[in-house]
């Protein structure tokens, strides 16, 4: 039986990869292109959207679904990662406090509190609302990790209170209301991860996410910590590996029991000339050896390549265009290359998720759903 996730704008088959349309667009493609690739849902970012095009504009244009022409589910990230990437990495960009975060970017000041993050996400029409969290790097010092967990739990409690207030105010039914997801922080410290997960479970949310940078200082997946968080979250809850998008890392996380993923990596790789190709039929995927390879479109050996990117791909690009033509488009800098390459890598990720669901080499996790514990 297929594992599914029921949301206001549709049903998602699990596991699922969500391309990041951070600023309201998956770069280079439109809603029709996404549907043609089999994309089930996209993830956007409230921090970026509140600046451009701005909250009043989004609401004037009918919310994210109407504005973007995408009528399937939309997840909205809270802005927690920007707390890490912009503020923790450079104090000149603003400050973090118990009340929330203050960003000073390009001469503008933005305040983001747990309440405001939830208010914006719900105003935008998100299907899944993610609680604002205090994100850290795994190598951050103990004092910073402890403070991160304390803030993340406190902010999650405030997010839930504001979420419930807005649901009641809007009179949303169980079918109409979005799901609320909390993020487990704690860096690379098992006890802090246990503490954070336990306190979030006591508050009660519809689902949970693995928070913090998922790679170590050498760029390797933090498999032990990811596995621990999956063990800490009861099997009835879907767990989102936030920011995980490398195909091999996605496969590893599916084997642990993670079912939701998002990343800019596949689309960014496409735009920069790195295309993905299976080494065998993805319908019979095995997690043994290298199940995919990279194709670097700029390589001179592809100049006269009169074949698709991959013989195993059914994307619109591989159905109608050759690798040689894509090489030409890339070399002349034509924007058509970005669209065609993005279509291919997105379709690869959709085929990967379908293959991982059925791969016999993967230990299946119990059936899960984003259901409220209350």
Image (cartoon, grey):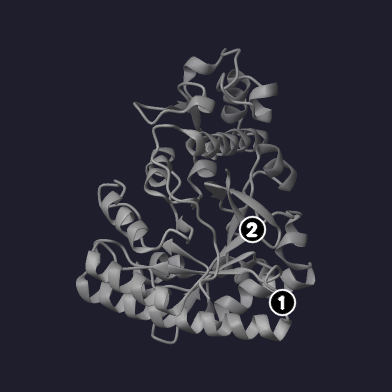
Q: Residue at x 77, y 61 (%)?
A: 66
Residue 198 image position (x, y, % from top left): 34, 73
Give the left or right position of residue 137, taking residue 258 as reference: left
Is residue 152 something one can see in this rendering? no
Near mark 1 (Cα within 10 A), the count class, few <14, some 14-19 or many ≥20, is: few
Image coordinates for residue 97, horizontal then vertical, percent: 39, 84
From the top left corner, tell me how far across and down residue 94 is, in percent.
42, 78
Residue 283 higher or lower than 72, as above or below = above
Across and down, in percent, residue 7 comes to 65, 60
The image quadrant of residue 243 is bottom left
Badge 2 local density, few (<14 within 10 Å), some, or many (20+)? some
Quadrant in which the N terminus appears:
top right
To which quarter of the image does residue 24 belong? bottom right
- The local secondary structure at tag 2 comes to strand
Position of 123 with respect to 370 (left or right) is: right
Residue 68 drawn above or below residue 256:
below
Dot 1 lies on which element? Answer: loop
Mark 1 / mark 2, whichever is N-terminal: 2
Between 181 and 336, the residue placed more toward the observer is: 181
Q: Residue at x 59, y 51 (%)?
A: 4
Report which residue position mark 2 lands on.
6
Q: Is residue 350 above or below residue 329?
A: below
- Residue 192 horizontal side relative to residue 366, left or right: left
Q: CA distance from mark 1 to mark 2?
A: 16 Å
Numbered-mark total = 2
In the picture, measured across the screen, residue 215 lies left or right of residue 114, that is left
What number is the disc on residue 248? none
Q: Which residue is mark 1?
A: 172
Residue at the image position 29 percent from the left and 69 percent from the top? 194
Asked if one can make out residue 334 in the rendered structure from this viewpoint, the answer is yes
Q: Classify residue 149 by image quadrant.
A: bottom left
């Amino acid at each position: 039986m297929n594992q599914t996730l029921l949301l206001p704008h549709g049903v998602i088959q699990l596991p699922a990869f969500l391309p990041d349309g951070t600023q309201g667009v998956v770069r280079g493609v439109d809603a029709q292109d996404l549907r043609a690739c089999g994309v089930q849902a996209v993830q956007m970012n409230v921090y970026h959207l509140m600046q451009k095009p701005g909250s009043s504009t989004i609401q004037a244009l009918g919310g994210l679904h109407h504005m973007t022409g995408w009528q399937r589910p939309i997840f909205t990230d809270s802005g927690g990662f920007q707390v890490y990437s912009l503020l923790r990495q450079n104090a000149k960009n603003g400050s973090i406090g118990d009340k929330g975060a203050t960003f000073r970017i390009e001469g503008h000041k933005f305040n983001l509190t747990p309440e405001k993050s939830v208010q914006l996400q719900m105003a935008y029409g998100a299907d899944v609302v993610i609680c604002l969290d205090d994100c850290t790097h795994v190598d951050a010092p103990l004092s910073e990790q402890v403070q991160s967990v304390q803030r993340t739990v406190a902010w999650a409690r405030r997010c839930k209170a504001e979420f419930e207030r807005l649901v009641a105010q809007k009179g949303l039914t169980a079918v109409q209301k979005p799901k609320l997801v909390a993020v487990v922080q704690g860096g690379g410290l098992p006890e802090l991860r246990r503490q954070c997960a336990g306190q979030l479970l006591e508050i009660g949310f519809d689902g949970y996410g693995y928070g913090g940078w998922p790679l170590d200082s050498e760029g390797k997946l933090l498999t032990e910590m990811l596995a621990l968080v999956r063990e800490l979250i009861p099997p009835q809850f879907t767990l989102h590996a936030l920011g995980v998008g490398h195909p091999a890392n996605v496969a590893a996380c599916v084997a642990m029991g993670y079912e939701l993923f998002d990343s800019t990596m596949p689309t960014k790789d496409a735009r920069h000339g790195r295309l993905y190709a299976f080494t065998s039929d993805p319908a019979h995927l095995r997690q043994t050896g290298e199940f995919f390879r990279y194709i670097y479109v700029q390589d001179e050996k592809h100049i006269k390549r009169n074949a698709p990117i991959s013989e195993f791909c059914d994307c619109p690009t591989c159905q109608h265009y050759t690798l040689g033509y894509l090489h030409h488009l890339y070399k002349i800098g034509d924007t058509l290359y970005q669209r065609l390459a993005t279509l291919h890598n997105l379709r690869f990720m959709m085929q990967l998720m379908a293959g991982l669901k059925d791969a016999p080499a993967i230990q299946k996790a119990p059936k899960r759903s984003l259901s409220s514990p209350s």
